[in-house]
Structures are given as C-alpha cells and as structure tokens.
Image (cartoon, helix red, strand yellow):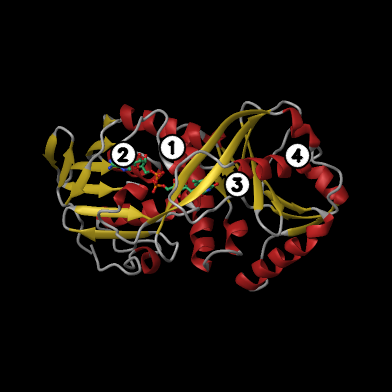
C-alpha cells in the first residue's frame, strides 16, 4: 500500500482535539512529523464527548448490545492502552479491576438475559463469573446488601479520561506540537480554513466528531448525560452497572472520591442541560446501589453528543491530502486504539492495517469521501 504522505517529515494538521485528535497528533509527532492541532473549544476543558465520557473500556458489557467487531476491537484496546499510558508516563490512569453487574431482585431477569446475550455473541466463551451476595460483598463491600446475584467481568478496565486528555496535550506540546484552542476550522484536502484564513498542509486528519458533518452527511449525534458526584462515604474499585428493564446505570469511580454516573442514550442532538427526569432517575438508581450516596455532592451535570454513523461503527476514509476518522459512538475509549492504529498504519503506508475490513468500509449511505 502506498503511504498517504511520502516525505520523512511532513506538516500535518489535525482538526479536533478530542480523543482521536489528541491520540493521532501525539503519535504523528512521535513519528517525527510537524503537527498543528486545532479545536473549536478550550483545550484544557474541551467540549469533546471524550471530556464528558465515563472512560470505561468494557468490551464484554458492550458486546451484548453491539456488533461482534466492537468486542474484538475492544480486546485490542485492553492491550494497547497500558502501552500508550506507559509511553506518556501515566500508567496509573489505567485501572483493570474488571466490571461488576448487579440487579435488584425484581430485575434479575435482566442479568440472566445479559449473560445469555453475551454467551450467544461469544459462542459460549464469555470470560465472566456469576456471583452470589457474599462474593459481591467481597468485591465491593460498600454496595447495598440487597444484591443477591451479580456478574463479574474480570478483564474489563476503566481509565481516568480527563487526566488522560490533559497528559496527551502535555505530551503533544512537549514534542513541539502547535496547538490552537478556540479555533473552529473547516477541512479540505491539504488545507485547513481557520477564522484567520486558509493554511496549506501535506495532510489533514479530520477528527472533529459531530463537527465533521460537512464530510459525513449521515453522521448523527446521540445524546448522553452524566452526573459527577463526590463523597468519601463510599469506595468502589471498579465500574458497577445496575441492570434495569429501562436502562443500565453505570457508576465509574474516579480519583478524589469522585464518581461519574450515566445511563442515558437518547436519539437526539439536543445539547441543552440534563432533564429533571434523567436527574431523578440517575440519582435514585444511584441511591439504591448504596444509601451512602445520599450525602454525595453533585459537582457537575454533563451533556454531550456521541458521534455515530448509521451502523454505529467507526469508519476511516481517505483521499489524497485528507483522512477522516469518526463514528466512535458510545465506544470512544474502547475503539480508539483500533481506529488510531489503523489510521497510523495507513499514513505510514504499512500494508497490515488492523481491522481494515470494518474501519475502511465506507460509512453507510455515503459515497466514498
Ligand atoms: C455521556 C457519555 C459517556 C461516554 N462514556 C464512554 C465510556 O465510558 N467509554 C467509551 O469508550 N466511550 C464513551 N463515550 C463515547 C466517547 O466519548 C466518544 O466515542 C469519543 O469521545 C469520540 O471521540 P472523537 O475524538 O471522535 O470525538 P470528540 O471526543 O467529541 O472530539 C471531537 C473534537 O472536535 C472538536 N471540533 C468539533 N468541530 C470542530 C471544528 N469545526 N473545528 C475544530 N474542532 C472541532 C470538538 O470541540 C471536540 O473537542 C461516552 C460519550 C458520552 C457522551
């Protein structure tokens, strides 16, 4: 395969400093390219979905509701993230303590159904363990005592995503990357148009998430909401998911006695603040996980849009001078390693691009860009 860029050192623009943009910019700088990174928002507190996200890397939890390839790319991520975090000297941001799924007695059917779906998707080889009340208590002693059955998925991980985004920005700057916040851009083959005018590059990589609709008319945003709470009254070692007939609540522990709680996935591009209904549902479900959450302080309510194609899978498109990577949907941290390694192999001209059959496929209802 021919490399997209041919000189040893190129000037490459990366549009969008969310999850994909930062990873790609950092890797291209490490390859010796000159990189200019643009984001429409603030670089320290970006408007990216990556900033709002919970940072779970949960290939099994997602398998029951996604394509099999999401699981396969997710397993790739479980190997790749620790390597990248070592490389930016931040291994502690990665926690691989598994995930725990529980259900209240009246909802145990949800847990059983989840396990069936998982076994079906993975041909009966799902690495998960059924737990009784004693085993749940041993794993997470601070959870409410009423949970009689649970599932433990030992391979799964979570990371401190906001700290990761900050570390990546630091690494980009340390390698000489030129970074522009508050700078919305439009991208074209070999050209970026900023509010100050057009600028030429050897290659433009578009990682603008939902902002890349000019290239992808079929791209949509899927609303997600999170609560950030803080309490020293409860400690969790791993993400806990509460199965419920209408939603799966997740609680992800973060440093500083913080927890990110989410559940919602709404087919809407509304970015307005969280609704009262979501706030009540998240809060009361959280309280049933442990009454110790009652005194938690609400620090933040987050709303953002997950960038998604019609098939809810990521796609990388290429033409001379312009590459786009998008559509990570609800799986940004799970799929970014596969997408970034695929894209870099393309730029480097390596023949063996991982997951080429999925990622290089044209997004549905779009002709090749
Ligand atoms: C509530 C919620 C919870 C989530 N939880 C998880 C999770 O636990 N695990 C997981 O794997 N995934 C999760 N995700 C999904 C994950 O956040 C996304 O898949 C991922 O962030 C997508 O990465 P991206 O780089 O494509 O887009 P983004 O992270 O959204 O970054 C796009 C960037 O492009 C910038 N941009 C847009 N337009 C322009 C423009 N014109 N010019 C310059 N810059 C522009 C934006 O400002 C933004 O910074 C969650 C998402 C949400 C909303």
Residue pointed to by mark 4: 287
The residue at which mark 2 appears reads as 30
Looking at the image, which is closer to me, 107 or 82? 107
Count the marks: how many? 4
Whether label 1 touches label 2, CB < 8 Å:
yes
Q: Position of residue 325 (x, y in %)?
A: 33, 54
State the residue at coordinates (52%, 37%). Answer: 302
Please tell me which residue is depicted at 71% across the width and 37% down the height of the picture.
236
Q: Secondary structure at mark 4?
A: helix
Q: Secondary structure at mark 2?
A: helix
Give the CA separation, mark 4 to mark 3. Answer: 24 Å
Residue 157's mark? 3
| Quadrant containing the N terminus in the rendered view | bottom left
Task: Tell me the element at label 3.
Answer: strand
The label nearer to you, 1 versus 4, is 4
The answer, for residue 234, to whether it is visible in the render is no
Residue 277 in picture, x, y percent from top left: 63, 45
CA gap, disc 1 and disc 4 = 39 Å
Task: Determine the CA span between mark 4 and mark 2.
Answer: 46 Å
When the figure is inspected, residue 256 is found, relative to residue 238, above or below; the finding is: above
Mark 1 / mark 4, whichever is N-terminal: 1
Q: Quick check: 95 above or below 220? A: above
Instruction: Work out whether mark 4 precedes mark 3 in sequence or the reverse, and give the earlier one.
Output: 3
Asked if labels 2 and 3 touch by Cβ distance under 8 angstroms, the answer is no
Q: Quadrant of the C terminus?
A: bottom left
The disc placed on residue 87 is: 1
Q: Note whether ligand 1 is within 8 Å of mark 4.
A: no
Earlier in the chain: of badge 1 and badge 3, it is 1
Determine whether the residue tagged by mark 1 lies in a helix, strand or loop: helix
Q: Kindly tell me whether mark 1's CB lies below 8 Å from ligand 1.
A: no
Please state which of the two labelled residues, at mark 4 or mark 3, is closer to the viewer.
4
């Amino acid at each position: 395969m021919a490399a997209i860029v041919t000189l040893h050192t190129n000037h490459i623009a990366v549009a969008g400093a969310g999850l994909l943009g930062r990873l790609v910019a950092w890797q291209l700088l490490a390859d010796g390219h000159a990189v200019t990174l643009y984001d429409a928002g603030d670089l320290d507190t970006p408007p990216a979905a990556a900033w709002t996200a919970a940072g779970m890397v949960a290939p099994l939890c997602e398998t029951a509701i996604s394509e099999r390839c999401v699981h396969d790319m997710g397993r790739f991520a479980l190997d790749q993230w620790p390597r990248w975090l070592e490389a930016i000297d931040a291994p502690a941001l990665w926690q691989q303590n598994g995930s725990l799924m529980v259900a209240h007695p009246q909802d145990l059917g949800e847990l059983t159904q989840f396990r069936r779906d998982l076994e079906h998707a993975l041909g009966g080889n799902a690495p998960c363990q059924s737990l009784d009340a004693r085993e749940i208590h041993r794993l997470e002693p601070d959870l409410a005592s009423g949970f009689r059955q649970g599932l433990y998925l030992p391979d799964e991980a979570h990371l401190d995503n906001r700290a990761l985004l900050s570390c990546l920005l630091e690494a980009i700057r340390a390698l000489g990357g030129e970074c522009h916040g508050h700078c919305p851009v439009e991208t074209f083959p070999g050209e970026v148009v900023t509010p100050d005018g057009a600028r030429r590059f050897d290659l433009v990589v578009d990682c603008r998430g939902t902002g890349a609709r000019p290239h992808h008319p079929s791209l949509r945003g899927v609303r997600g909401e999170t609560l950030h709470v803080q309490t020293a009254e409860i400690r969790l070692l791993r993400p806990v998911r509460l199965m419920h007939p209408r939603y799966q609540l997740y609680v992800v522990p973060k440093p500083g006695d913080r927890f990110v709680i989410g559940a919602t996935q709404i087919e809407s591009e509304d970015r307005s603040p969280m609704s009262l209904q979501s706030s009540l549902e998240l809060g009361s479900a959280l309280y049933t996980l442990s009454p110790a959450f009652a005194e938690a302080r609400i620090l933040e309510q987050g709303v953002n849009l997950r960038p998604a194609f019609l098939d809810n899978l990521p796609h990388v498109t290429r033409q001379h001078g312009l590459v786009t990577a998008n559509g990570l949907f609800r799986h940004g941290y799970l799929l970014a390693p596969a997408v970034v390694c695929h894209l870099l192999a393309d730029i480097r001209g390596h023949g063996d691009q991982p997951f080429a059959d999925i990622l290089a496929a044209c997004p549905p209802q779009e002709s090749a860009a």
